[in-house]
Image (cartoon, rainbow, N blue to C red):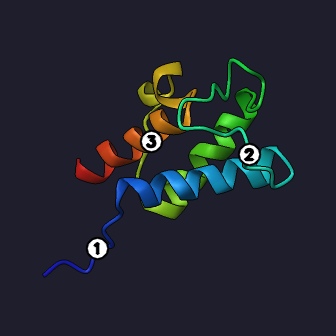
Amino acid sequence: MSSEPTFQRTDILAEIRTFVANWFRDGKADGLDDDTPLVTSGIVDSAGVLEVVEFLEQRFAVRVQDADLSLGNCNTLRGLTELVKSRLSA
């Protein structure tokens, strides 16, 4: 039996939403839907993407590669969640 924590997709999504709301929107999660554009709307800038990545790596014990830093992975909460899930299963 593994001692590694298992994270459900809904839990990952909720934690990322809370982090983005707290870090970039003064705690306001309203309007942060799964597919709300984060980077292209200006909620998260390029330096902010690095903050999000650092959070993901620390919270979920995953390693995000430079090649993972694309709009497809980093522009929405859903993309970030799928990135974490793919890294957890790798």
Q: Which mark is residue 15?
A: none
Quick check: marks 3 and 1 in contact, CB under 8 Å?
no
Q: Between residues 18 and 47, which one lies in front from this camera angle?
A: 18
Q: Is residue 19 left or right of residue 82?
A: right
Kind of element beneath mark 1: loop
Q: How far apart are labels 3 and 2 at the CA level?
A: 27 Å
Q: Extreme left residue here? A: 1
- Residue 78 position in % (x across, y down): 47, 37
Please give the label number shown on residue 4. Answer: 1
Q: Secondary structure at mark 3?
A: loop
Q: Earlier in the sequence, mark 3 or mark 1?
A: 1
Nearer-the-camera pick, 49 or 31:
31
At 87% across and 51% down in the image, what residue appears? 26
Residue 7 picture location, percent across and down = 35, 63
Tell me the residue that label 3 is attached to. Answer: 64
Picture residue at 63% right of the left edge, 45% below the top: 52
Task: Count residues near mark 3 (Cα–Cα under 10 Å), then give few for <14, some for 14-19, many for 20+.
Answer: some
Give the residue type that dot 2 points to.
Asp
Q: Earlier in the sequence, mark 3 or mark 2?
A: 2
Left or right: where 25 falls relative to 87: right
Between 89 and 18, the residue placed more toward the observer is 18
Q: Which residue is mark 2?
A: 30
Residue shown at the point (57%, 51%) measured from the top left: 16
Residue at (56% x, 31% y) in the render: 76
Are there few (<14), some (14-19), or many (20+) residues within 10 Å of tag 2?
Answer: few
Tell me which label, 1 or 2, sits earlier in the chain: 1
Give the residue type at disc 3.
Val
Q: Quadrant of residue 65?
A: top left
- Measure how far apart labels 3 and 1 are at the Cα level: 18 Å
